[in-house]
Amino acid sequence: MWFLGSESWVLGSIFYVGLLLKMDLCMGNDELFVSTNGTSGWPSSVSSMYILGDSSVDCGDNTPFYPILHQNLSLNPCNGSDQTLLPQLLAKKMGLQYVKPFYSQNGSMEDLLNGVNYGAAQATIMYPKRGSYQSLNQQLRQAFETIQLLQLQLGQDTAKSLIESSLFYLSFGKDDLINYLVDDESSTSPGYDGLRFTHILVDQMINVIQNLYDANVRKIVCMGILPLGCSPSVMSIRYNSSIGYKLGCENDVNLLVLEYNTRLEQRIVDLNIKMRGAQVIFCDTYRAMMEFIFHPQAYGFEDAKNACCGTGEYGGTKGCLSPDMACPRASTHVWWDLYNPTEAVNVLLANSAWSGDPLPSICRPITFKALESSAY
Ligand SMILES: *[C@@H]1O[C@H](CO)[C@@H](O)[C@H](O)[C@H]1NC(C)=O
Ligand SMILES: *[C@@H]1O[C@H](CO)[C@@H](O)[C@H](O)[C@H]1NC(C)=O
Ligand SMILES: *[C@@H]1O[C@H](CO)[C@@H](O)[C@H](O)[C@H]1NC(C)=O
Ligand SMILES: *[C@@H]1O[C@H](CO)[C@@H](O)[C@H](O)[C@H]1NC(C)=O
Ligand SMILES: *[C@@H]1O[C@H](CO)[C@@H](O)[C@H](O)[C@H]1NC(C)=O
């Protein structure tokens, strides 16, 4: 089920027509396939990576209108380069080249074959309320247009095997929950409606996975939501000056996140049985982050509460408006900005997701490494 009808989808299409025209239509198929190798020297079982998501996959510049349409949230959810974010760190481990943002491709087939990052900071699963213009469905539409282009250029059979060996990386949900919390006047206790809302979010994600499967996608990774209840953003929203700074996390918010994560993983377990030949992985980044937040010293962190880059309570009021605002030693912080982790955390997450070290079983039922080496 898609809910379309935003002007951004029209803009996306206009962009794509331009891309088609720019594309070198005379390129031969044999020539194209050389670039789908991993750099490991062996043909990689994951030939390319297509990334859909929010600020967990994009540093804020993946839009043709950057920075005109940016809102008041963090302009710099990472320190300048999305190469420090989890999906790019994992792409590197899988021997893939840097996955270019959708709006910075030059239209070459080579770019498309390596993969595309459709992600955009602040993207939501649901139709965006606040004029945030890169929702899940917008990005999904762009991904399907890429698949169509591959079919046109390579022929059905070649495109099919390329798509089957590609990894689709999905990382959404936190902006939906943040919007929900901000909108809910009585947000002291989200309660039943909050739980129901997370169920709707999970239903949407499951629909997307099924749509991708129907388009021959066989390898899908779905990231859970981080413990937002411990994030500088939520701690700042809930800040009460007569109480002052609190220890611990906002448990009711974390309960919503857990409801989303748990339900999503359960549905994914079912999908893995139902969808023949598919490998769908759920990554429990919540559990990993809680480990870093409650045992910071064990992982080299000194501050598990305040954002490295941001202003206001817990550095979580305005977000990172410029990297100049950042703390001097970002690697000692768990949180980079409002609700995004630092590069140091992303490296630990990537290592754990890849091989289960230092944190085992973050990605289930198998690690990225097992996914990468499993023959399709
Ligand atoms: C791609 O893989 C083939 C084997 O399938 C190998 O012969 C070739 O050297 C590889 N090319 C690159 C650029 O790694
Ligand atoms: C951004 O912040 C300014 C002042 O802080 C406010 O007037 C404006 O409405 C905000 N814009 C959005 C989109 O929230
Ligand atoms: C597009 O970028 C690729 C590298 O990603 C490069 O090899 C190619 O020459 C570029 N094509 C154009 C038309 O700029
Ligand atoms: C802040 O805390 C005080 C003391 O517990 C309480 O009386 C007050 O209602 C709180 N304010 C808000 C806005 O929650
Ligand atoms: C941000 O990245 C720049 C360039 O790599 C680096 O010089 C700077 O130290 C980084 N800042 C933080 C806070 O990590």
Image: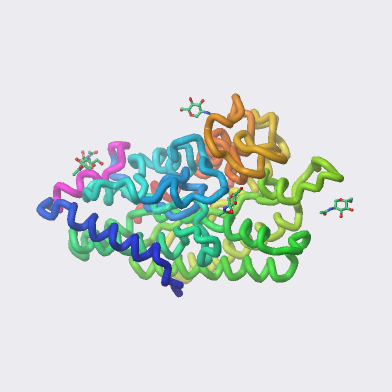
Q: Quadrant of residue 305?
A: top right
Identified at 18% across, 52% down, the residue is 22
Magenta-drawn segment? 29-41
What type of secondary structure mainly makes up the magenta span?
helix
Color theme of the render:
rainbow
Q: Quadrant of the N terminus?
A: bottom left
For this rendering, which residue is in front, 374 or 21? Answer: 21
For this rendering, which residue is in front, 91 or 17? Answer: 17
Observer able to see residue 45: no
- Image height of 226 relative to 202, above or below: above
Question: How far across and how far down the image is residue 55, in percent?
Answer: 51, 48
Question: How far across and how far down the image is residue 27, in percent?
Answer: 12, 51
- Image height of 310 relative to 266, above or below: above
Question: Is 268 displayed left or right of 239 in the figure?
Answer: left
Identified at 26% across, 64% down, the residue is 148
Identified at 23% across, 47% down, the residue is 110
Q: Ligand 3 quadrant? A: top left
For this rendering, which residue is in front, 16 or 41? Answer: 16
For this rendering, which residue is in front, 76 or 229? Answer: 76
Residue 34 magenta: yes
